[in-house]
Amino acid sequence: MLTIQKRPNEIVSLLTADFQPRYEPQFAWKSAVSQHQALPGLRGFWPTSSFDTNGDLIDLSGQGNDLTYNGNPIYYSAQLFSNVVLDGTGDYFSHVGGIGSWCDITGTETYVHPNRRGVTIGGWFRFTNVAGANEYMIAKWDPAGNGRSYQLYRSIAGQIIFGVSSNGQAATVQNIGSISNPAQNEWFWAAGRYDDATSYSTVWYNDESNDLDLTIAGWAGSLHSNATDLLIGGYHGGSGLMTGHFAHCFTCATGVPDAIQNQTYQQTRAMFGV
């Protein structure tokens, strides 16, 4: 005879004072930074909780890759988490690039296992305006020159787009968009990954993901190496600026596996009310 054990919801609720639920803002808050610091190949992690006397955004990866304050962004705290407010007019954070610099990632670095070579970027974001122009969240991207590498942005149509380039030129840019679009004033998690082992790119919007086989379009096999700077809130030179908030942004010199990507979202989303 089959016996079914019912879940005692009332008891579970009573015991939350003694046993911490998995979906709890306080639990997410106390472990969010350490989770991101454990991302494989971490090159930069900017939770927005730490900034210096110039307003520069401090990197907590341990590599000292701080980002320079541009315009007049505002540091803010909402509920349990810190974040930065960008007004879409001159506001962004940047790091000067260079061939061989920490952000000049090709995805073919030989010191990384062949099954994990790639690049991954992402973070938590909130747009306070309605989509109507391409607004960049994280980018090492110079469309005016031969300086395209990787980008994560919200398109004019409201999709979250991840794009990469193998030679820095528009002809080899491959873009892949999210299945759903974030609403205005909605906090959401977004990430993009280039996986050198499979030549696939993937974009995440919360727990949704979408893949693109780059070899279909004749992918050259690595991201373009160039001296373009890395920005949060825009792309090279302070263009394509974002209007909204960001927090817990990161850059990794590996193709971070699905399991870690999904757990990063699931274990931090309660803090953002998602």
Image: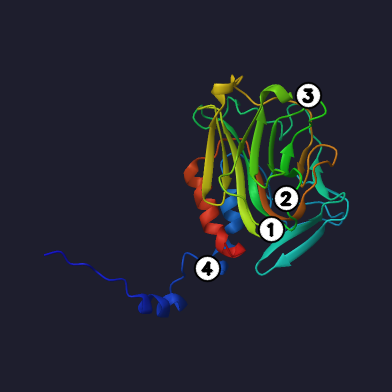
Question: In the drawing, does residue 90 fall left or right of residue 244?
Answer: right
Name the secondary structure under disc 1.
loop
Q: N-terminal of the two: label 4 or label 2?
A: 4
- Looking at the image, residue 71 lies above or below residue 253: below
Nearer the viewer's eye, disc 4 or disc 2? 2
Is the C-beta separation of discs 3 and 4 under 8 Å? no
Is the C-beta separation of discs 1 and 2 under 8 Å? no
Check residue 113 in the rendering and tell me which mark sits there, or answer none. Answer: none
Kindly identify the amino acid type of the residue bearing the numbered disc 3.
Asn
Check residue 184 in the rendering and tell me which mark sits there, or answer none. Answer: 1
> Residue 47: in sight, yes or no?
no
Question: In the drawing, does residue 214 fall left or right of residue 137?
Answer: left
- Looking at the image, residue 109 lies above or below residue 60: above
Residue 107 in the image: x percent, y percent? 61, 29
Tell me how many marks there are: 4
Nearer the viewer's eye, disc 4 or disc 1? 1
Q: N-terminal of the two: label 2 or label 3?
A: 2
Q: N-terminal of the two: label 1 or label 2?
A: 2
Which residue matches tag 4?
A: 24
Which residue matches tag 2?
A: 131
Name the secondary structure under disc 2.
loop
The C terminus, quarter of image: bottom right
Is the C-beta separation of discs 4 and 2 under 8 Å? no
Q: N-terminal of the two: label 4 or label 1?
A: 4
Kindly identify the amino acid type of the residue bearing the numbered disc 4.
Glu
Nearer the viewer's eye, disc 3 or disc 4? 3
Q: Which colour scheme is used?
A: rainbow
Q: Can you tell which quarter of the image residue 4 is in?
A: bottom left
Is the C-beta separation of discs 4 and 1 under 8 Å? no
Check residue 146 in the rendering and tell me which mark sits there, or answer none. Answer: 3
Q: N-terminal of the two: label 3 or label 4?
A: 4
Q: Nearer the viewer, residue 35 or 159?
A: 159
